Amino acid sequence: MPGVLRGALPVAIAALAAAGFAATVGLGNRPATAAVEQGSCARLFRQSVRTLSDRAAKRITRRVTPERVSRLVSLRRPRRVKASTSRLGGAERRTYRIKVRLVAARLGAGGARTGEIELVVADPSTGQRMVVGFADPACRGQRAAAARSARASFLTACGAPPETYYARLTGTARIAGVGFFGPRAGPFATRNGLQLRPATDFHSDDCVLWPEPPRVVAAAGDIACDPDNPLFNGGQGAPRACRMLATSDVLLRLKLDAVLPLGDTQYDYGAPEAYPLSYEPTWGRVKAISHPVIGNHEYLSPRAEGYFDYFGHTAGPLGRGYYSFDLGAWHVVVLNANCSIVRCRAGSPQEKWLRDDLVAHTNGCVLALWHQALFSSGWSRGTRAVRPFWDDLYKAGADLVLNGHDHDYERFAPQSPSGSLDSSRGIREFVVGTGGSYLGPWTGIAPNSEVRENHTFGVLKLTLRDASYDWEFVPVAGSEFTDSGSGACH
């Protein structure tokens, strides 16, 4: 969509980070295996591979076979067979040498991934991708010296990649590595899942590791009026209500990587027939880069069918309303705060999922989104049922929480889950219920509330950097209120 998407990275690399590429190569947050203690480089790099025994892996031939990536990714993946078979002519017993275009890299972090480098490469002519793994520096075993040398050569040529996201690489390289069939899941996995793990040689004269550019997002909730609203005015709205067109015009003026609708996207009932008439002509213009939050008004339509039908897979699994994704160096968690419908309490499926998700993602910066705020000076005065979210996020060192629900703008100082001022580990909360529907009253000033405004529609713009963030409230045309500042990630 012209004027909306930033051209910072190729679409493939942006998708790489957003899709959680660790799933592609089978490197979840697994505990360290006996591989490290036993010193087997082959086992260390095959945590999920089940097609060759560790005993057979020790007999891998030292003969290097020149091959093209396109040939390797087209090899037929073996079915479950005995480890003593020939493995399709030795696909899992040979060291292959390939010429590649460099795509992206990440340094593993945590557990058995500590120190390992994940490199994504592509065939220069076909663009077909595969994964190369560089050894943990502590790796021992038959090929340890070659594996450590390849890792050192990569670091000399390209520099150290980040731990929290896949950074873009450019250049070409010649790489040798042992071929293993690994997991096939994920948008960038090859058809057969063949990977070179570990790499035993690396050489590049033109490798460039690009720093992660800032990601710019905009957020607001409580957005589109019902078409039957007397103030709908053909979608143009009125001064104090139905300003979804004006706020969406703000989105189009900004150069954004993502839009975060913070719930109550379509009033009054989230009806399937209302979305095409109100939300679609306004905020629907940035639907391609939107990551929605489910609000309470969505559930006034049975099973929130209007919401899930309209946003589709971008709203997460059907009926659940919570999901997560990576945005550059940041990890973003989207939660469902309709706690009477999808439980929020400690030990509930959603809360367990949140804890597991925060453990599995080691990003240095974390942003969480849901609709009903824990702290608010607006009419709701906060929703205590979402306290377990704050407990988990606080323990994980999260940085920002964005909410809607109350129809106003409010910024809080960093706080603990109990509402105590905490400048060292506290989470900063923004309530941004200024997406266009209408504006509401204050019911008292909550502790640690720093800025409040309930006369201006607009969106919160966030610039998400590697270890910090900037915020700016951007009002609709004709309004003057704004609020800006910056903060550091924990």
Image: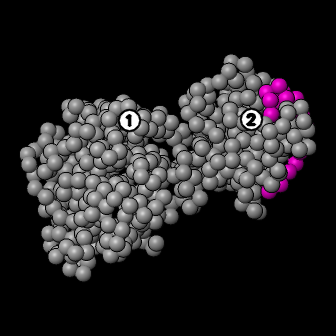
Whether the residues at callouts 2 and 1 have beta carbons within 8 Å, the answer is: no
Which residues lie in the magenta part? Answer: 52-71
Instruction: Give the side of residue 153 with respect to residue 332, left or right.
Output: right
Few, some or many C-alpha atoms within 10 Å of disc 1 (few <14, some 14-19, many ≥20)? few
x 78%, y 23%: residue = 141
Q: Is residue 363 in the magenta section? A: no
What's the CA distance linking mark 2 and mark 1?
A: 33 Å
Q: Which residue is mark 2?
A: 50
x 29%, y 51%: residue = 371
Q: Which residue is mark 1?
A: 348
* Residue 83 position within the rendered picture, expressed as x and y whole percent measured from the top left: 85, 32
The kind of residue tagged 1 is Ser
Q: Can residue 173 be seen from the camera position used here?
A: no
Q: Nearer the viewer, residue 300 or 83?
A: 300
* Residue 336 position within the rendered picture, expressed as x and y whole percent measured from the top left: 35, 47
Few, some or many C-alpha atoms within 10 Å of disc 2 (few <14, some 14-19, many ≥20)? some
Q: Nearer the viewer, residue 23 or 156?
A: 23
Which callout, 2 or 1, points to the residue nearer the camera? 1
- Number of labels in the image equals 2
Q: Which quadrant would residue 318 be assigned to in this image?
A: bottom left
* Residue 32 position within the rendered picture, expressed as x and y whole percent measured from the top left: 61, 25
Quarter that holds the C terminus: top left
Q: Secondary structure at mark 2?
A: loop
x 15%, y 73%: residue = 239
x 27%, y 67%: residue = 224
Q: Can residue 43 be seen from the camera position used here?
A: yes
Q: Secondary structure at mark 1?
A: loop
> Which tag, 2 or 1, sits closer to the chain's start?
2
The kind of residue tagged 2 is Arg
* Residue 465 position within the rendered picture, expressed as x and y whole percent measured from the top left: 42, 48
